[in-house]
Amino acid sequence: MNCRPQAAMLFAAGFGTRMGALTRDRPKPLVEVAGRPLIDHALDLLRPLSLPRVVANLHYKPDMLRAHLEPLGVALSLEQPEILDTGGGLRAALPLLGPGPVFTLNTDAIWSGPNPLELLSAAWDEGAMDALLICIRPDRALGHTGAGDFALGDTGHITRGPGVIYGGAQILRTELLDEIDEDVFSLNRVWDKMLARNRLFALEYPGRWCDVGHPDGIALAETLLAEAPDV
């Protein structure tokens, strides 16, 4: 059963501390790559889906993001007085996102290749899956160090361990968010519940991907975009 999500959550509330001086006067989603804010590159991925609801969460320097996003029709979920992390932020935004599964998308990555959200949409099976994550092999990932986040099996099931890197894009059912008692929590808590149910899946991304969570990632991402073939 493929019931495509009708809403997307952009994670845009973080402090961007790894960016150093670049985020002293702006939130990380407004740091530019190839002359455009990171969050605009993320919105490019959403545009072909024509979703009726797109939401971004705000916390650090929210007025700057509000001025940028409101004219674009993005609904805003302000996290005050404290930042809520990915799980808490997603749960707080549910009144704006509406019912059903949602896309979630980090705003600090650049993709080169097929639209990852369209790949997720085509592979989503709500009857079998609680979440479907896009993951990248380390040899296709720029600006990322480490052994990976998940081991990906032949059936698409994933387990914790070295292997592939979570790319920051997924489809996720939101019902399990209500089983977390805390207000501030990571989506890792929800993924662990899905792992226990054997309903956490991943799709390997066939293109290339760059982490732009740190200053060196900007030049890497710009090189990646410059090398991308015209389509």
Image (cartoon, rainbow, N blue to C red):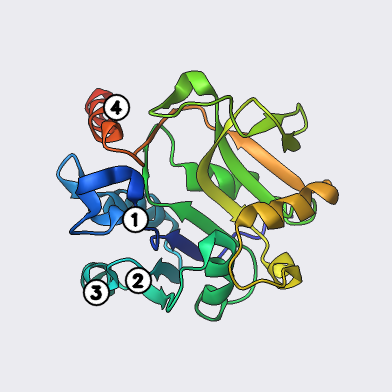
List x then y, in percent, for residue 64.
Answer: 22, 69
Looking at the rendering, which quadrant does residue 53 occupy?
bottom left
Instruction: Return the disc, 3 or 4, that comes first in the chain's sequence.
Output: 3
Of the residues shown, which amino acid type is indicated by label 4?
Leu
Q: Quick check: 192 above or below 87?
A: above
**How far apart are labels 3 and 4 at the CA level?**
31 Å
Q: Pointer 3 and pointer 2: residues touching (CB < 8 Å)?
A: no
In this picture, residue 124 sits left or right of residue 13: right
Q: Pointer 1 and pointer 2: residues touching (CB < 8 Å)?
A: yes
**How far apart are labels 3 and 1 at the CA level?**
19 Å
Which sits in the foreground, 48 or 54?
Answer: 54
Instruction: Return the disc, 1 or 2, that comes first in the chain's sequence.
Output: 1
Residue pointed to by mark 1? 43
**Point 23% across, 30% down: residue:** 219
- The label nearer to you, 3 versus 4, is 3
**How far apart are labels 2 and 4 at the CA level?**
27 Å
Judged from the image, the secondary structure of the residue bearing numbered disc 4 is: helix
